[in-house]
Image (cartoon, rainbow, N blue to C red):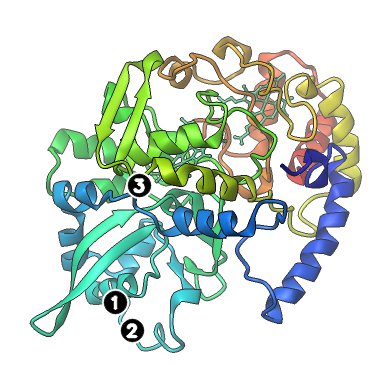
Amino acid sequence: MRKQGEYSTRKAPMRQFRIDVIGALLVGAALLGLVACDGEGLTDQAPDDLAQGREIFRFDTFGDETFWTDTLRIHEVIQAAVSPQTALGIGLKVDADALPAGTLENADLNDPATTVALLKLNAVVGLKGTVETVNGSDVLTRVGITCALCHSTVDNRVAPGIGSRLDGWPNLQLNSGAIIALSPALTPTQKAVYNSWGPGKYDARFNFDGQNDPAVIPPAYGLAGVNSVTFTGDGDRPAYWNRYVAVTQMHGHGSFFESRLSISVNNPPDVVEEKLAALEAYQLSLTTPAPPAGSFDVAAAVRGESVFEGQGQCATCHTGATFTDANVRLHQPSDVPTDPTHAQRSATGMYRTTPLRALWQHPPYFHDGSAATLADVVERYNAASALGLTPLQKADLVEYLKSI
Ligand code: HEC
Ligand code: HEC
Protein backbone atom coordinates (compact mmCIF):
# COMPACT_ATOMS: atom_id res chain seq x y z
CA MET A 1 0.00 0.00 0.00
CA ARG A 2 1.28 3.42 -0.86
CA LYS A 3 2.08 5.70 2.05
CA GLN A 4 -0.50 8.43 2.42
CA GLY A 5 1.98 11.27 2.56
CA GLU A 6 3.20 10.49 -0.92
CA TYR A 7 0.08 11.69 -2.60
CA SER A 8 -1.46 14.04 -0.12
CA THR A 9 -0.20 16.13 2.75
CA ARG A 10 -1.91 18.60 4.99
CA LYS A 11 0.17 21.40 3.52
CA ALA A 12 -2.06 21.46 0.49
CA PRO A 13 -0.72 24.61 -1.18
CA MET A 14 2.81 23.20 -1.07
CA ARG A 15 1.60 19.87 -2.35
CA GLN A 16 -0.05 21.82 -5.10
CA PHE A 17 3.23 23.20 -6.38
CA ARG A 18 4.78 19.76 -6.45
CA ILE A 19 1.84 18.18 -8.22
CA ASP A 20 1.66 21.00 -10.73
CA VAL A 21 5.17 20.22 -11.82
CA ILE A 22 4.51 16.50 -11.93
CA GLY A 23 1.22 17.18 -13.71
CA ALA A 24 2.95 19.33 -16.32
CA LEU A 25 5.47 16.58 -16.93
CA LEU A 26 2.71 14.00 -17.23
CA VAL A 27 0.76 16.15 -19.65
CA GLY A 28 3.93 16.60 -21.68
CA ALA A 29 4.53 12.86 -21.64
CA ALA A 30 0.92 12.18 -22.60
CA LEU A 31 1.22 14.53 -25.54
CA LEU A 32 4.24 12.58 -26.66
CA GLY A 33 2.13 9.45 -26.42
CA LEU A 34 4.24 8.02 -23.63
CA VAL A 35 1.55 7.45 -21.04
CA ALA A 36 -2.17 6.87 -21.24
CA CYS A 37 -4.17 9.78 -19.86
CA ASP A 38 -6.34 7.73 -17.55
CA GLY A 39 -5.68 8.84 -14.03
CA GLU A 40 -3.90 5.94 -12.43
CA GLY A 41 -0.42 6.59 -11.24
CA LEU A 42 0.74 4.15 -8.60
CA THR A 43 3.30 1.53 -9.24
CA ASP A 44 3.48 -0.57 -6.08
CA GLN A 45 0.48 -2.73 -6.97
CA ALA A 46 1.19 -5.60 -9.32
CA PRO A 47 0.73 -4.03 -12.77
CA ASP A 48 -1.31 -7.04 -13.89
CA ASP A 49 -3.78 -6.49 -11.07
CA LEU A 50 -4.14 -2.83 -11.94
CA ALA A 51 -4.62 -3.51 -15.64
CA GLN A 52 -7.17 -6.17 -14.84
CA GLY A 53 -8.88 -3.91 -12.31
CA ARG A 54 -9.08 -1.11 -14.84
CA GLU A 55 -10.63 -3.45 -17.36
CA ILE A 56 -13.26 -4.51 -14.80
CA PHE A 57 -13.94 -0.93 -13.69
CA ARG A 58 -14.43 0.27 -17.26
CA PHE A 59 -15.97 -2.64 -19.08
CA ASP A 60 -17.31 -5.36 -16.76
CA THR A 61 -21.07 -5.67 -16.41
CA PHE A 62 -20.91 -8.74 -14.15
CA GLY A 63 -23.59 -10.15 -16.43
CA ASP A 64 -26.05 -7.38 -15.52
CA GLU A 65 -27.48 -7.49 -19.05
CA THR A 66 -30.01 -9.91 -17.60
CA PHE A 67 -31.46 -6.87 -15.78
CA TRP A 68 -30.83 -3.92 -18.13
CA THR A 69 -31.77 -5.91 -21.24
CA ASP A 70 -34.05 -8.77 -20.24
CA THR A 71 -35.95 -6.96 -17.48
CA LEU A 72 -35.72 -3.23 -18.23
CA ARG A 73 -35.41 -3.57 -22.04
CA ILE A 74 -33.23 -0.47 -22.20
CA HIS A 75 -31.65 -1.76 -25.42
CA GLU A 76 -34.95 -1.34 -27.24
CA VAL A 77 -35.23 2.28 -26.19
CA ILE A 78 -31.63 3.07 -27.15
CA GLN A 79 -32.03 1.49 -30.56
CA ALA A 80 -35.30 3.29 -31.26
CA ALA A 81 -34.89 6.69 -29.70
CA VAL A 82 -31.56 7.59 -28.08
CA SER A 83 -29.42 9.66 -30.45
CA PRO A 84 -25.93 10.71 -29.36
CA GLN A 85 -27.31 14.19 -28.68
CA THR A 86 -29.98 12.70 -26.40
CA ALA A 87 -27.36 10.51 -24.72
CA LEU A 88 -25.02 13.46 -24.13
CA GLY A 89 -28.00 15.42 -22.84
CA ILE A 90 -28.58 12.93 -20.04
CA GLY A 91 -24.91 13.00 -19.17
CA LEU A 92 -23.54 9.96 -20.96
CA LYS A 93 -19.93 10.42 -22.11
CA VAL A 94 -18.16 9.33 -25.27
CA ASP A 95 -14.64 7.89 -25.11
CA ALA A 96 -12.90 9.68 -27.98
CA ASP A 97 -9.91 7.35 -27.76
CA ALA A 98 -12.08 4.41 -28.81
CA LEU A 99 -13.10 6.13 -32.04
CA PRO A 100 -11.25 5.66 -35.32
CA ALA A 101 -10.26 9.00 -36.87
CA GLY A 102 -13.10 10.69 -38.71
CA THR A 103 -15.89 8.80 -36.91
CA LEU A 104 -17.54 11.86 -35.40
CA GLU A 105 -16.97 14.17 -38.34
CA ASN A 106 -19.01 11.88 -40.56
CA ALA A 107 -21.69 10.92 -38.05
CA ASP A 108 -25.24 12.15 -37.63
CA LEU A 109 -25.43 12.89 -33.93
CA ASN A 110 -29.21 13.10 -34.09
CA ASP A 111 -29.61 9.53 -35.30
CA PRO A 112 -30.04 6.67 -32.78
CA ALA A 113 -28.18 4.45 -35.28
CA THR A 114 -25.06 6.49 -34.47
CA THR A 115 -25.47 5.58 -30.78
CA VAL A 116 -25.59 1.91 -31.78
CA ALA A 117 -22.44 2.46 -33.87
CA LEU A 118 -20.72 4.06 -30.86
CA LEU A 119 -21.76 1.13 -28.66
CA LYS A 120 -20.36 -1.26 -31.26
CA LEU A 121 -17.03 0.58 -30.92
CA ASN A 122 -17.32 0.29 -27.10
CA ALA A 123 -17.11 4.07 -26.95
CA VAL A 124 -19.98 4.98 -24.60
CA VAL A 125 -18.48 5.28 -21.12
CA GLY A 126 -20.13 2.86 -18.69
CA LEU A 127 -22.45 1.21 -21.22
CA LYS A 128 -21.52 -2.14 -22.70
CA GLY A 129 -23.47 -3.13 -25.79
CA THR A 130 -23.62 -6.20 -27.95
CA VAL A 131 -24.33 -5.26 -31.54
CA GLU A 132 -25.25 -7.94 -34.05
CA THR A 133 -25.94 -7.76 -37.74
CA VAL A 134 -29.54 -8.68 -38.46
CA ASN A 135 -30.66 -8.63 -42.11
CA GLY A 136 -27.71 -6.44 -43.01
CA SER A 137 -28.17 -3.79 -40.30
CA ASP A 138 -26.64 -3.30 -36.88
CA VAL A 139 -28.97 -4.17 -34.03
CA LEU A 140 -28.28 -3.62 -30.33
CA THR A 141 -29.23 -6.97 -28.84
CA ARG A 142 -27.79 -6.64 -25.30
CA VAL A 143 -26.80 -3.77 -23.07
CA GLY A 144 -25.42 -3.59 -19.55
CA ILE A 145 -23.76 -1.02 -17.29
CA THR A 146 -20.33 -0.82 -15.66
CA CYS A 147 -18.82 1.07 -12.72
CA ALA A 148 -17.54 3.72 -15.15
CA LEU A 149 -21.10 4.85 -15.85
CA CYS A 150 -21.21 6.77 -12.58
CA HIS A 151 -17.55 7.00 -11.57
CA SER A 152 -15.84 8.11 -14.78
CA THR A 153 -16.14 11.15 -16.93
CA VAL A 154 -14.13 12.52 -19.87
CA ASP A 155 -11.91 15.57 -20.32
CA ASN A 156 -14.10 17.12 -23.06
CA ARG A 157 -11.05 17.49 -25.32
CA VAL A 158 -13.10 16.89 -28.49
CA ALA A 159 -16.41 18.47 -27.48
CA PRO A 160 -18.53 18.69 -24.34
CA GLY A 161 -19.05 15.09 -23.20
CA ILE A 162 -16.54 13.68 -25.70
CA GLY A 163 -12.92 13.14 -24.73
CA SER A 164 -10.44 10.92 -22.92
CA ARG A 165 -11.58 8.94 -19.90
CA LEU A 166 -11.02 10.23 -16.38
CA ASP A 167 -11.54 7.19 -14.19
CA GLY A 168 -12.68 7.81 -10.63
CA TRP A 169 -14.07 11.27 -11.41
CA PRO A 170 -17.78 11.24 -10.57
CA ASN A 171 -20.04 11.87 -13.54
CA LEU A 172 -22.04 14.73 -12.10
CA GLN A 173 -23.89 15.35 -15.35
CA LEU A 174 -25.18 11.79 -15.44
CA ASN A 175 -28.93 11.63 -14.98
CA SER A 176 -29.01 7.99 -13.92
CA GLY A 177 -32.63 8.22 -12.84
CA ALA A 178 -33.70 9.51 -16.26
CA ILE A 179 -31.82 6.63 -17.90
CA ILE A 180 -33.55 4.02 -15.74
CA ALA A 181 -36.88 5.76 -16.34
CA LEU A 182 -36.47 5.13 -20.09
CA SER A 183 -37.43 1.54 -19.38
CA PRO A 184 -40.84 0.50 -20.70
CA ALA A 185 -41.02 -2.06 -17.88
CA LEU A 186 -41.55 0.41 -15.03
CA THR A 187 -44.74 1.78 -13.53
CA PRO A 188 -45.51 5.52 -13.78
CA THR A 189 -44.97 5.80 -10.01
CA GLN A 190 -41.50 4.25 -10.26
CA LYS A 191 -40.64 6.44 -13.23
CA ALA A 192 -41.69 9.56 -11.32
CA VAL A 193 -39.24 8.72 -8.53
CA TYR A 194 -36.36 8.00 -10.93
CA ASN A 195 -37.07 11.18 -12.90
CA SER A 196 -36.99 13.24 -9.70
CA TRP A 197 -33.32 12.51 -8.90
CA GLY A 198 -31.67 14.82 -11.42
CA PRO A 199 -28.07 14.95 -12.63
CA GLY A 200 -25.21 13.61 -10.52
CA LYS A 201 -27.38 11.72 -8.07
CA TYR A 202 -28.35 8.13 -7.45
CA ASP A 203 -30.17 6.33 -4.67
CA ALA A 204 -28.52 3.02 -3.85
CA ARG A 205 -31.21 2.07 -1.31
CA PHE A 206 -34.44 2.90 -3.13
CA ASN A 207 -34.92 -0.64 -4.40
CA PHE A 208 -34.81 -1.93 -0.80
CA ASP A 209 -36.59 0.64 1.34
CA GLY A 210 -38.64 2.58 -1.23
CA GLN A 211 -37.47 5.96 0.13
CA ASN A 212 -36.63 8.70 -2.32
CA ASP A 213 -33.45 10.28 -0.95
CA PRO A 214 -30.69 10.17 -3.62
CA ALA A 215 -27.02 10.83 -2.84
CA VAL A 216 -24.47 12.71 -4.90
CA ILE A 217 -22.21 10.34 -6.82
CA PRO A 218 -18.88 10.59 -4.95
CA PRO A 219 -15.39 10.39 -6.44
CA ALA A 220 -13.86 6.91 -6.50
CA TYR A 221 -10.32 8.36 -6.36
CA GLY A 222 -8.31 9.35 -3.30
CA LEU A 223 -9.49 6.50 -1.09
CA ALA A 224 -6.08 4.94 -0.36
CA GLY A 225 -5.59 4.96 3.39
CA VAL A 226 -9.29 5.51 4.16
CA ASN A 227 -10.63 2.37 5.79
CA SER A 228 -14.26 3.33 5.54
CA VAL A 229 -16.40 3.70 2.46
CA THR A 230 -19.64 5.45 1.56
CA PHE A 231 -21.03 8.59 3.13
CA THR A 232 -22.18 6.45 6.03
CA GLY A 233 -19.09 4.27 6.47
CA ASP A 234 -20.96 1.07 5.74
CA GLY A 235 -17.87 -0.93 4.87
CA ASP A 236 -14.16 -0.91 5.73
CA ARG A 237 -12.94 -1.21 2.18
CA PRO A 238 -14.14 -0.38 -1.34
CA ALA A 239 -14.67 -4.12 -1.97
CA TYR A 240 -17.60 -4.16 0.49
CA TRP A 241 -19.42 -1.48 -1.42
CA ASN A 242 -18.33 -2.76 -4.83
CA ARG A 243 -20.01 -6.03 -4.08
CA TYR A 244 -23.11 -4.21 -2.84
CA VAL A 245 -23.40 -2.08 -5.98
CA ALA A 246 -22.41 -4.78 -8.45
CA VAL A 247 -24.99 -7.22 -7.10
CA THR A 248 -27.84 -5.12 -5.74
CA GLN A 249 -27.75 -2.00 -7.97
CA MET A 250 -26.13 -2.96 -11.25
CA HIS A 251 -27.86 -6.34 -10.83
CA GLY A 252 -24.74 -8.28 -11.77
CA HIS A 253 -24.41 -11.93 -10.96
CA GLY A 254 -23.13 -12.62 -7.46
CA SER A 255 -24.30 -12.52 -3.90
CA PHE A 256 -24.53 -9.91 -1.16
CA PHE A 257 -25.53 -10.40 2.46
CA GLU A 258 -25.85 -7.62 5.02
CA SER A 259 -27.37 -8.61 8.32
CA ARG A 260 -27.47 -5.01 9.60
CA LEU A 261 -29.99 -4.16 6.88
CA SER A 262 -31.51 -7.62 6.49
CA ILE A 263 -30.40 -7.68 2.87
CA SER A 264 -29.75 -11.00 1.22
CA VAL A 265 -29.41 -11.15 -2.53
CA ASN A 266 -28.25 -14.19 -4.43
CA ASN A 267 -28.06 -14.00 -8.19
CA PRO A 268 -26.01 -16.96 -9.41
CA PRO A 269 -23.61 -17.79 -10.95
CA ASP A 270 -21.21 -15.58 -8.96
CA VAL A 271 -18.94 -13.61 -11.32
CA VAL A 272 -18.37 -10.72 -8.88
CA GLU A 273 -16.38 -12.33 -6.06
CA GLU A 274 -13.35 -13.27 -8.17
CA LYS A 275 -13.03 -9.70 -9.49
CA LEU A 276 -13.22 -7.76 -6.24
CA ALA A 277 -9.50 -7.81 -5.39
CA ALA A 278 -8.31 -6.42 -8.72
CA LEU A 279 -11.18 -3.93 -8.84
CA GLU A 280 -10.31 -2.63 -5.40
CA ALA A 281 -6.60 -2.42 -6.21
CA TYR A 282 -7.41 -0.30 -9.25
CA GLN A 283 -9.66 2.05 -7.28
CA LEU A 284 -7.04 2.51 -4.59
CA SER A 285 -4.54 3.44 -7.30
CA LEU A 286 -6.69 6.34 -8.49
CA THR A 287 -5.10 9.48 -7.11
CA THR A 288 -6.80 12.75 -6.29
CA PRO A 289 -6.49 15.23 -9.17
CA ALA A 290 -4.66 18.44 -8.27
CA PRO A 291 -6.45 21.76 -8.58
CA PRO A 292 -5.87 23.52 -11.91
CA ALA A 293 -3.06 26.05 -11.85
CA GLY A 294 -4.32 29.46 -10.79
CA SER A 295 -7.67 28.15 -9.55
CA PHE A 296 -7.18 29.48 -6.02
CA ASP A 297 -5.38 32.32 -4.26
CA VAL A 298 -2.30 30.81 -2.63
CA ALA A 299 -1.79 33.47 0.03
CA ALA A 300 -5.44 33.31 1.05
CA ALA A 301 -5.28 29.50 1.10
CA VAL A 302 -2.32 29.60 3.49
CA ARG A 303 -4.33 31.85 5.81
CA GLY A 304 -7.39 29.62 5.30
CA GLU A 305 -5.43 26.60 6.48
CA SER A 306 -5.04 28.31 9.87
CA VAL A 307 -8.79 28.85 10.01
CA PHE A 308 -9.36 25.19 9.09
CA GLU A 309 -7.12 24.04 11.92
CA GLY A 310 -8.03 26.75 14.41
CA GLN A 311 -11.20 28.73 14.86
CA GLY A 312 -13.09 26.75 12.19
CA GLN A 313 -12.51 23.48 14.12
CA CYS A 314 -12.59 21.62 10.81
CA ALA A 315 -9.44 19.61 11.53
CA THR A 316 -11.01 18.04 14.62
CA CYS A 317 -12.81 15.71 12.20
CA HIS A 318 -11.08 16.31 8.85
CA THR A 319 -7.72 15.12 10.21
CA GLY A 320 -4.44 14.01 8.69
CA ALA A 321 -3.38 13.45 5.12
CA THR A 322 -6.76 12.11 4.04
CA PHE A 323 -8.71 14.83 5.88
CA THR A 324 -10.86 12.36 7.78
CA ASP A 325 -11.12 10.62 11.14
CA ALA A 326 -13.01 7.80 9.43
CA ASN A 327 -10.45 5.19 10.42
CA VAL A 328 -11.25 5.72 14.08
CA ARG A 329 -14.86 6.88 14.33
CA LEU A 330 -18.10 7.75 12.63
CA HIS A 331 -20.39 10.63 13.65
CA GLN A 332 -23.96 10.93 14.79
CA PRO A 333 -26.01 12.78 12.18
CA SER A 334 -26.59 15.52 14.76
CA ASP A 335 -22.81 16.23 14.74
CA VAL A 336 -23.01 17.70 11.24
CA PRO A 337 -25.24 20.34 9.66
CA THR A 338 -26.88 17.99 7.12
CA ASP A 339 -30.06 15.98 6.77
CA PRO A 340 -30.07 12.79 8.91
CA THR A 341 -32.24 10.67 6.58
CA HIS A 342 -29.42 9.13 4.56
CA ALA A 343 -27.62 7.96 7.70
CA GLN A 344 -30.81 6.53 9.14
CA ARG A 345 -31.25 4.36 6.04
CA SER A 346 -27.69 2.99 6.19
CA ALA A 347 -26.10 0.04 7.95
CA THR A 348 -24.33 2.25 10.51
CA GLY A 349 -26.90 4.97 11.17
CA MET A 350 -23.94 7.39 11.20
CA TYR A 351 -22.03 9.70 8.89
CA ARG A 352 -18.40 9.22 7.96
CA THR A 353 -16.34 12.42 7.89
CA THR A 354 -15.94 12.75 4.14
CA PRO A 355 -12.29 12.49 3.13
CA LEU A 356 -11.76 15.84 1.40
CA ARG A 357 -10.51 15.16 -2.13
CA ALA A 358 -10.26 17.57 -5.06
CA LEU A 359 -13.13 19.65 -3.75
CA TRP A 360 -12.68 22.02 -6.72
CA GLN A 361 -13.67 19.14 -8.98
CA HIS A 362 -16.99 17.91 -7.67
CA PRO A 363 -19.62 20.38 -6.48
CA PRO A 364 -22.26 20.12 -5.07
CA TYR A 365 -21.18 19.14 -1.56
CA PHE A 366 -22.43 16.97 1.30
CA HIS A 367 -24.03 13.59 0.70
CA ASP A 368 -27.20 15.11 -0.71
CA GLY A 369 -25.60 17.96 -2.62
CA SER A 370 -27.32 20.43 -0.32
CA ALA A 371 -24.40 22.88 -0.50
CA ALA A 372 -23.93 24.19 -4.04
CA THR A 373 -20.59 25.87 -3.37
CA LEU A 374 -17.74 25.75 -0.89
CA ALA A 375 -18.89 29.13 0.41
CA ASP A 376 -22.23 27.48 1.21
CA VAL A 377 -20.41 24.69 3.08
CA VAL A 378 -18.47 27.19 5.19
CA GLU A 379 -21.59 29.25 5.84
CA ARG A 380 -23.43 26.12 6.99
CA TYR A 381 -20.74 25.17 9.53
CA ASN A 382 -20.30 28.77 10.64
CA ALA A 383 -23.98 29.07 11.50
CA ALA A 384 -24.50 25.56 12.92
CA SER A 385 -21.48 25.63 15.22
CA ALA A 386 -21.54 29.39 15.95
CA LEU A 387 -17.92 29.65 14.83
CA GLY A 388 -18.05 33.44 14.53
CA LEU A 389 -15.86 33.55 11.43
CA THR A 390 -15.35 36.97 9.85
CA PRO A 391 -16.06 37.47 6.12
CA LEU A 392 -12.29 37.42 5.46
CA GLN A 393 -11.80 34.19 7.43
CA LYS A 394 -14.64 32.57 5.51
CA ALA A 395 -13.21 33.67 2.17
CA ASP A 396 -9.73 32.42 3.15
CA LEU A 397 -11.16 29.09 4.26
CA VAL A 398 -12.89 28.70 0.90
CA GLU A 399 -9.57 29.32 -0.91
CA TYR A 400 -7.94 26.66 1.25
CA LEU A 401 -10.73 24.17 0.50
CA LYS A 402 -10.24 24.84 -3.23
CA SER A 403 -6.59 23.87 -2.81
CA ILE A 404 -7.32 20.47 -1.23
C1 HEC B 1 -25.63 4.17 -10.83
C2 HEC B 1 -24.47 4.86 -10.32
C3 HEC B 1 -23.36 4.05 -9.69
C4 HEC B 1 -22.75 2.93 -10.18
C5 HEC B 1 -23.04 2.15 -11.47
C6 HEC B 1 -21.71 2.61 -9.25
N1 HEC B 1 -21.70 3.51 -8.23
FE1 HEC B 1 -20.32 3.66 -6.79
N2 HEC B 1 -21.45 5.02 -5.81
C7 HEC B 1 -22.60 5.60 -6.31
C8 HEC B 1 -23.21 6.39 -5.25
C9 HEC B 1 -24.49 7.21 -5.35
C10 HEC B 1 -22.41 6.26 -4.11
C11 HEC B 1 -22.65 6.87 -2.72
C12 HEC B 1 -23.44 5.86 -1.92
C13 HEC B 1 -23.69 6.29 -0.50
O1 HEC B 1 -22.74 6.65 0.22
O2 HEC B 1 -24.85 6.24 -0.09
C14 HEC B 1 -21.29 5.41 -4.51
C15 HEC B 1 -20.22 5.08 -3.69
C16 HEC B 1 -19.08 4.44 -4.13
C17 HEC B 1 -17.85 4.34 -3.40
C18 HEC B 1 -17.55 4.95 -2.04
C19 HEC B 1 -16.86 6.27 -2.21
C20 HEC B 1 -16.45 6.84 -0.87
O3 HEC B 1 -16.21 8.06 -0.79
O4 HEC B 1 -16.37 6.10 0.10
C21 HEC B 1 -16.98 3.60 -4.17
C22 HEC B 1 -15.56 3.23 -3.82
C23 HEC B 1 -17.70 3.22 -5.37
N3 HEC B 1 -18.95 3.76 -5.32
C24 HEC B 1 -17.19 2.41 -6.36
C25 HEC B 1 -17.99 1.81 -7.35
C26 HEC B 1 -17.60 0.67 -8.15
C27 HEC B 1 -16.27 -0.03 -8.12
C28 HEC B 1 -18.67 0.38 -8.96
C29 HEC B 1 -18.83 -0.80 -9.89
C30 HEC B 1 -18.85 -2.10 -9.22
C31 HEC B 1 -19.69 1.39 -8.68
N4 HEC B 1 -19.26 2.19 -7.66
C32 HEC B 1 -20.86 1.52 -9.38
C33 HEC B 1 -23.08 5.45 -7.59
C34 HEC B 1 -22.72 4.40 -8.44
C1 HEC C 1 -17.94 16.82 13.76
C2 HEC C 1 -17.06 16.48 12.67
C3 HEC C 1 -16.88 17.50 11.57
C4 HEC C 1 -16.44 18.81 11.66
C5 HEC C 1 -16.05 19.58 12.92
C6 HEC C 1 -16.40 19.32 10.32
N1 HEC C 1 -16.79 18.36 9.43
FE1 HEC C 1 -16.93 18.56 7.43
N2 HEC C 1 -17.85 16.76 7.31
C7 HEC C 1 -18.12 15.93 8.36
C8 HEC C 1 -19.01 14.89 7.94
C9 HEC C 1 -19.53 13.76 8.81
C10 HEC C 1 -19.30 15.14 6.59
C11 HEC C 1 -20.29 14.38 5.71
C12 HEC C 1 -21.67 15.01 5.92
C13 HEC C 1 -22.65 14.76 4.81
O1 HEC C 1 -22.23 14.48 3.68
O2 HEC C 1 -23.84 14.86 5.09
C14 HEC C 1 -18.56 16.34 6.23
C15 HEC C 1 -18.55 16.88 4.95
C16 HEC C 1 -17.80 17.99 4.58
C17 HEC C 1 -17.66 18.50 3.25
C18 HEC C 1 -18.30 17.90 2.00
C19 HEC C 1 -17.30 17.10 1.20
C20 HEC C 1 -17.85 16.52 -0.05
O3 HEC C 1 -17.07 15.91 -0.81
O4 HEC C 1 -19.08 16.61 -0.30
C21 HEC C 1 -16.85 19.58 3.30
C22 HEC C 1 -16.39 20.43 2.13
C23 HEC C 1 -16.51 19.78 4.69
N3 HEC C 1 -17.10 18.79 5.43
C24 HEC C 1 -15.73 20.81 5.15
C25 HEC C 1 -15.64 21.13 6.50
C26 HEC C 1 -15.16 22.40 6.99
C27 HEC C 1 -14.65 23.53 6.12
C28 HEC C 1 -15.24 22.35 8.35
C29 HEC C 1 -14.90 23.44 9.34
C30 HEC C 1 -15.62 24.69 9.16
C31 HEC C 1 -15.78 21.05 8.69
N4 HEC C 1 -16.03 20.35 7.55
C32 HEC C 1 -16.01 20.60 10.00
C33 HEC C 1 -17.60 16.06 9.63
C34 HEC C 1 -17.12 17.25 10.16
Q: Residues within 10 Å of mark 1 (few under 14, many from 20)?
A: some
Q: Going from the N terminus, do you reach mark 2 or mark 1 first? A: 2
Q: Amino acid at mark 3?
A: Ser
Residue carrying label 3: 176
Quarter-of-image position of residue 33? bottom right
Picture layout, residue 107 above or below residue 226:
below
Q: Which mark is residue 117?
A: 1
Q: Residue 217, position in %: x, y?
A: 48, 41
Which residue does the image show at 45% across and 22% down from the upper left? Answer: 342
The amino acid beneath tag 1 is Ala
Instruction: Give the Cα distance between marks 3 and 1.
Output: 22 Å
Kindly state the secondary structure of the residue where label 2 is placed.
Answer: loop
The quarter of the image that holds ligand 2 is: top right
Q: Position of residue 182 (x, y in %)?
A: 21, 51
Q: Give the quarter of the image for residue 384.
A: top right
Q: Is residue 362 above or below residue 98?
A: above
Image quarter for residue 350? top right
Residue lying furthest left? 135
Question: Between marks 2 and 1, how big is the CA–CA gap?
Answer: 9 Å
Residue 395 falls left or right of residue 127: right
Looking at the image, is mark 2 or mark 3 earlier in the sequence? 2
